[in-house]
Image (cartoon, rainbow, N blue to C red):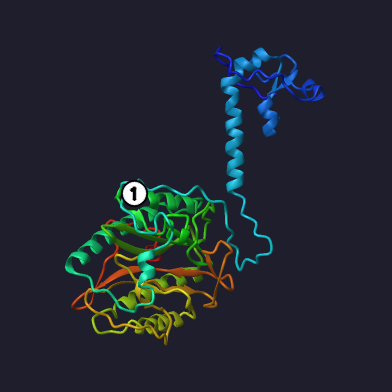
Amino acid sequence: GNRKCRIPNTRPHTHTHTMAGSADAAATQVCCTADCEKPAKMRCPTCIKLGITEGSFFCAQDCFKANWDSHKAVHAAFKAAKLEEQRNTPLHWPGFNFTGSMRPYPQSPTRVVPPQIPRPDYAETGIPVSEQEVRRSTVIQQLSDEEQELMRVVCKLGRECLDEAAKAVDVGVTSDELDRIVHEAAVDRECYPSPLNYYDFPKSCCVSTNEVICHGIPDFYKLKNGDIVNVDVSVYKHGHHADLNETFLVGDVDEASLTLVRTTYECLMKAIEHVRPGNKYRDLGNIISKHAATQNLSVVRSYCGHGVNSLFHTAPSVPHYAKNKAVGIMKEGHTFTIEPMINQGTWQDTQWPDKWTVVTMDGRRSAQFEHTLLVTETGCEVLTKRLPNSPAGKMWFETARK
């Protein structure tokens, strides 16, 4: 039998039902109470219900009652192990053909934002009414000096939230843990995490690993050595949204993945150099596609950069591929994102049945980087730029430097 440490003589628990279990099973067992060598005649009913064998046998009610306070820890440990097993088991979607090796895992309950934190219009209903009202408009808002200052504030806070997640990226860390960190970082800064309940999205950030292009839902998948993982953070404060993301390296990443991540970062930075008043939004795709092609990489076409201000997603639309037909000329006071998604293989994508997770059609890897930008008189300001204390350890350029 399982030996327990000596039990203090505590008040018996109210579990006094007659023990169940076959006499034959009990006959081969010894009472599991410490220092009791008597043959077992009964089993704990909760253990029977849970399917626990080891440490469930007792000689009599008295031993069971006296042992209850420590014995119930057996139930707690068993339940915890069962929960861990469930979390580590991928969800099964019969008939769905996955394109790569990533699988969905169970999710934690949706996290709560304290009621005193101001929230966007979709926070309760899931429907961004204010966005939908201007959905067909190509008019690009020019922010006032006051609005630009509010964007600076929220973008710096968004950067801090992403940096908190960056510090945590490591082998064995779950994407749910990254979501918890982003959620708590946002709430600590009195921000609402913009993805939460946006068209019913269940989490506070997007975590997209390997062949997942974007909109990965954080779950209990544990990051593996060699993975690449994108964390996309958006936060809302003072009536304005920030939006940024980075792709991080997990442990030792192969050369092809390193090239993919590095090139994707370069695509973003080269496009940013072209942002100034008078330039066309549609030209950014030519710059990005040209650079991606130097490494035989492809550009995702289904998802674009976008205007971001008091609305999470609005005009302009900023495609990342060449020869696009995007409408709009950059003007001082525009705030928008550039967020190229670059693939190792085909540019084509497909979606998981969860209605969110976007993956490459061929299952090969995809990387992404994103900044929120403000068009200035002479060029642009990167509102979500890395701070002097931003962690660089998980970024490609830090690894390449070693």
Most extreme residue toward the right, as rendered? 24
Q: Nearer the viewer, residue 212 or 344?
A: 212
Q: Nearer the viewer, residue 92 or 67?
A: 92
Q: Quadrant of residue 37?
A: top right
Point 31% across, 49% down: residue: 117
Residue 300 image offset from top left, x and y in percent: 48, 76
> Badge 1: few (under 14), some or many (20 or more) residues near its Cα, within 10 Å?
some
Q: Nearer the viewer, residue 201 or 261?
A: 201
Judged left or right of residue 163, residue 259 is: right
Above or below, comparing residue 286 to residue 3 in the picture: below
Above or below, comparing residue 396 to residue 380 in the picture: above
Point 37% across, 63% down: residue: 398
Image mark count: 1
Q: Quadrant of the C terminus?
A: bottom left
Residue 401 image offset from top left, x and y in percent: 37, 65
Judged left or right of residue 68, residue 298 is: left
Q: Is residue 79 visible?
A: yes
Most extreme residue toward the bottom, as rendered? 323
Q: Which residue type carries mark 1? A: Val
Describe the element under mark 1 as helix, strand or loop: helix
Give the residue number, with chain letter if any, for mark 1. 187
Q: Quadrant of residue 333?
A: bottom left
Residue 321 image offset from top left, x and y in percent: 43, 81
Q: Quadrant of the N terminus?
A: top right
Q: Is residue 52 visible?
A: no
Residue 167 image offset from top left, x and y in percent: 38, 53
